[in-house]
């Protein structure tokens, strides 16, 4: 299996690394996060100019001919810089749905999204849903040729910056049925959509989104309106792989920062990096980060496999990254001491982001169960 990156992917990584170093230093990020907007639309436009928003899409869809590996490259560099702009929500998730939509939907939404002119957020989580993608109280009822959507979506990351929402809603069946689920494109300024925006602990912005008989046309439906769960799971697994790449970038920086700090901080006239117990911890942090990279590669390369293989790879990676992120983050803070959690020191912000990544699209416990259930189903089929 070839783990080498293409020349184009290497160029993307190098260009993005330089951009983040020059224009996304820690002090600048703090100012952006603390600002009223919480992000930089001009930076988003710059990402579009560099081709980052088009990189993961095929040339047939108007992209640069890349795929999940290109998204992985971008997300790892974003993780290193703790970039808050909604690449995951708009490009990986929003674009993931749109590229599987109709030609009309691609023409109307995908091209403006790649140009940075249209931003998407994924409204899927609900207050009582936990991590079950099929646990939906938001409903979509038939209204002539179109639909009316009503319900409440919780913690919609990136929604304050979005122009459109990708919304999951129940079209038939009971609350947790796997059938009867549809995916809809909804303009955020549509009549009946209300939002309550707030900052998140890791420096991003999210919204509680309420839908009150929001009317959408038949052209707002992505895929099978009665059986949209397989598509939702596929796009979510793609998001998990990209999220794991972001975590790898954040872990690498956290580990490097900790090693550097241990060389400078002295106790009893000696750099604490010379203490053997701390050396062992920092080696373990390095190993956790490297293992996470391997798992992320595996999950990304298996996104085009059959459903069971893809799901197992995504869950295995999410478990490993969740455990590694906690280990790296907690030990980085411990070695830095109490000052590690102050707002002025970068390491605390990496710890917060790694902590939140564990809870996005299912935490360690959720994905351990998902992997176990899929493996048990495999064994049952093999035994027949």
Image (cartoon, rainbow, N blue to C red):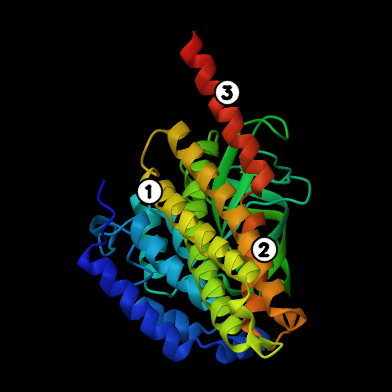
Residue drawn at point x = 71 percent, y = 88 percent: 268
Residue extending furthest left?
7
Q: Is residue 60 left or right of residue 349?
A: left
| Residues at marks 3 and 1, CA–CA distance in whole angstroms | 36 Å
Judged left or right of residue 63, residue 119 is right
- Write down the quadrant of residue 45 in the picture: bottom left
Q: Residue at x 53, y 84 (%)?
A: 40
Q: Residue tagged by mark 2?
A: 355
Give the Cα distance between marks 3 and 2.
29 Å
Residue hosting label 3: 376
Q: Position of residue 143 (x, y in %)?
A: 62, 43
Q: Residues within 10 Å of mark 3 (few under 14, many from 20)?
A: few
- Find residue 183 and report its horizontal and vertical position in percent: 55, 46
Camera-nearest residue between 197 and 10: 10
> Viewer-nearest of labels 2 and 1?
2
Q: Position of residue 217 (x, y in %)?
A: 53, 51
């Amino acid at each position: 299996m070839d783990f080498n990156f293409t020349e184009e992917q290497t160029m993307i990584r190098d260009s993005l690394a330089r951009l983040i170093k020059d224009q996304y230093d820690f002090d600048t990020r703090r100012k952006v996060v603390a600002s009223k907007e919480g992000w930089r639309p001009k930076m988003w436009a710059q990402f579009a100019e560099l081709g980052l928003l088009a990189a993961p899409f095929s040339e047939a869809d108007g992209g640069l001919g890349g795929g999940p590996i290109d998204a992985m490259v971008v997300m790892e560099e974003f993780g290193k810089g703790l970039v808050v702009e909604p690449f995951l929500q708009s490009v990986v998730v929003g674009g993931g749905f749109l590229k599987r939509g109709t030609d009309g939907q691609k023409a109307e939404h995908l091209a403006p999204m790649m140009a940075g002119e249209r931003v998407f957020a994924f409204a899927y989580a609900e207050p009582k849903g936990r991590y079950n993608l099929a646990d939906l109280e938001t409903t979509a009822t038939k209204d002539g040729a179109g639909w009316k959507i009503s319900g409440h979506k919780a913690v919609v990351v990136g929604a304050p910056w979005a122009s459109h929402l990708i919304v999951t809603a129940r079209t038939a069946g009971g609350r947790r049925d796997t059938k009867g689920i549809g995916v809809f494109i909804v303009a955020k300024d549509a009549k009946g959509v209300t939002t309550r925006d707030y900052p998140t602990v890791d420096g991003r912005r999210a919204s509680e989104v309420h839908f009150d008989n929001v009317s959408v046309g038949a052209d707002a439906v992505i895929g099978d309106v009665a059986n949209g769960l397989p598509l939702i799971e596929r796009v979510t697994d793609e998001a998990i792989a990209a999220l794991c790449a972001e975590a790898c970038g954040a872990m690498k920086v956290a580990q490097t920062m900790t090693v550097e700090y241990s060389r400078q901080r002295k106790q009893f006239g000696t750099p604490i990096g010379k203490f053997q117990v701390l050396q062992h911890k920092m080696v373990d942090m390095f190993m956790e980060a490297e293992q996470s990279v391997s798992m992320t590669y595996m999950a990304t390369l298996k996104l085009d496999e059959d459903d069971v293989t893809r799901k197992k790879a995504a869950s295995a990676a999410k478990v490993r990254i969740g455990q590694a992120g906690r280990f790296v983050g907690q030990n980085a803070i411990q070695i830095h001491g109490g000052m590690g959690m102050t707002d002025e020191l970068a390491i605390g912000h990496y710890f917060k982001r790694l902590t939140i990544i564990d809870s996005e699209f299912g935490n360690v416990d959720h994905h351990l169960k998902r992997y176990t259930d899929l493996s048990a189903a495999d064994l049952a089929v093999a035994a027949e």
